[in-house]
Image (cartoon, rainbow, N blue to C red):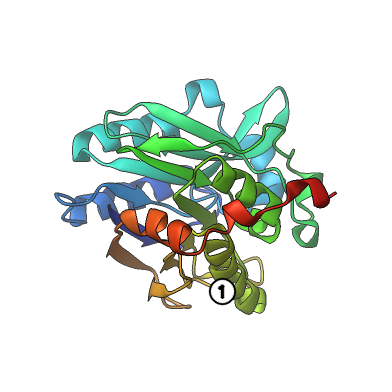
Amino acid sequence: MNIAVYQMDIIAGDPEANRKKVRQWLGEQELGEVDVVMLPEMWTTAYTLPELGEIAEDPGDSETIRFLQEAAKRHHVHIMGGSIAVKRNGEVYNRALVIDNTGALVYEYDKMHLVPMLNEPAYLSGGREPVKVFELGGIKMGVVICYDLRFPEIIRSLALQGCELLFIPAEWPDSRRNHWDVLSIARAVENQMYVVTCNRPGEYDNITFAGSSAFIDPWGNVLQKGSVEHEETLREILDLSNVADVRKNVPVFDSRVPDLYE
């Protein structure tokens, strides 16, 4: 599976400008062999938390969702659309979007863990639905968002559902970059799956972000890693048959004793 990750710097509080950036980026890429493109967390707004009540989109009438659907059809690629702020019944959610190459919205996930260090609970509501596996091109995949990386339980849930490839869009700060690197590798190793991360670079509101988007294989090898400071595109071709091989050679899931894990 051929995947292109857009390690995108984000224009704070300006969804239209960010859609324009993504439109231009897609137009500049040679996407003929690419299966999936991936965007970072909150890529339309950045972490403009006090403003999200005004600029979050109605998911039933979302210009960004329409934009992603049209782009997926035009370029004939699946889009792991990072996440955007959506507003429903007066509550704002940080929602991941997955669009297939026909333009169909195949999966949505609302970030369930909210970051106390950024005071997210004051502005966002946590997702109330458990994570689920979705499929693109016959591959079982999952997505969690940024801070969710610190909660291995939900990623193990995806692995037990058969997930072979995990996407993690993020706006992870540089001050905790070593956690980002170590935890991303750990989630790949312990769940014997590919992990593909997309984290923004740049700065906003006195926070410097870590970049360092990565492709990690089921053995924990970092196949490719982005820079810390710069906006860039990363591409990698993943051999998903490696997942079954690793799980056969090191049968972790057969060794589980969940009855003793209370």
Nearest to the observer: residue 47 or residue 136: 136
The residue drawn where x is 43% and y is 74% is: 221
Q: Quadrant of residue 150?
A: bottom right
Name the secondary structure under disc 1: helix
The residue drawn where x is 66% and y is 78% is: 175
The residue drawn where x is 59% and y is 68% is: 186
Question: Relative to 53, is 84 on the left or the right?
Answer: left
Expressed as whole percent of the image width and height from the top left, the position of residue 112 reads: 70, 43
Nearest to the observer: residue 98 or residue 202: 98
The residue drawn where x is 42% and y is 52% is: 39
Other residues around mark 1 within 10 Å, as few (<14) / some (14–19) / many (≥20): some
Expressed as whole percent of the image width and height from the top left, the position of residue 108 reads: 53, 33
Expressed as whole percent of the image width and height from the top left, the position of residue 27 reads: 20, 50
Q: In the displayed structure, would residue 112 be above or below residue 119?
A: above
Nearest to the observer: residue 111 or residue 134: 134
Q: In the displayed structure, would residue 20 be above or below residue 184?
A: above
Q: Is residue 76 visible?
A: yes
Q: Quadrant of residue 105?
A: top left
Residue that numbered label 1 is attached to: 181
Q: What residue type is labelled 1?
A: Asp
Q: In the displayed structure, would residue 17 be above or below residue 102?
A: below
Question: Relative to 244, is 47 on the left or the right?
Answer: right
Q: Is residue 174 visible?
A: no
Question: Relative to 244, is 257 on the left or the right?
Answer: right
Expressed as whole percent of the image width and height from the top left, the position of residue 124 reads: 73, 42
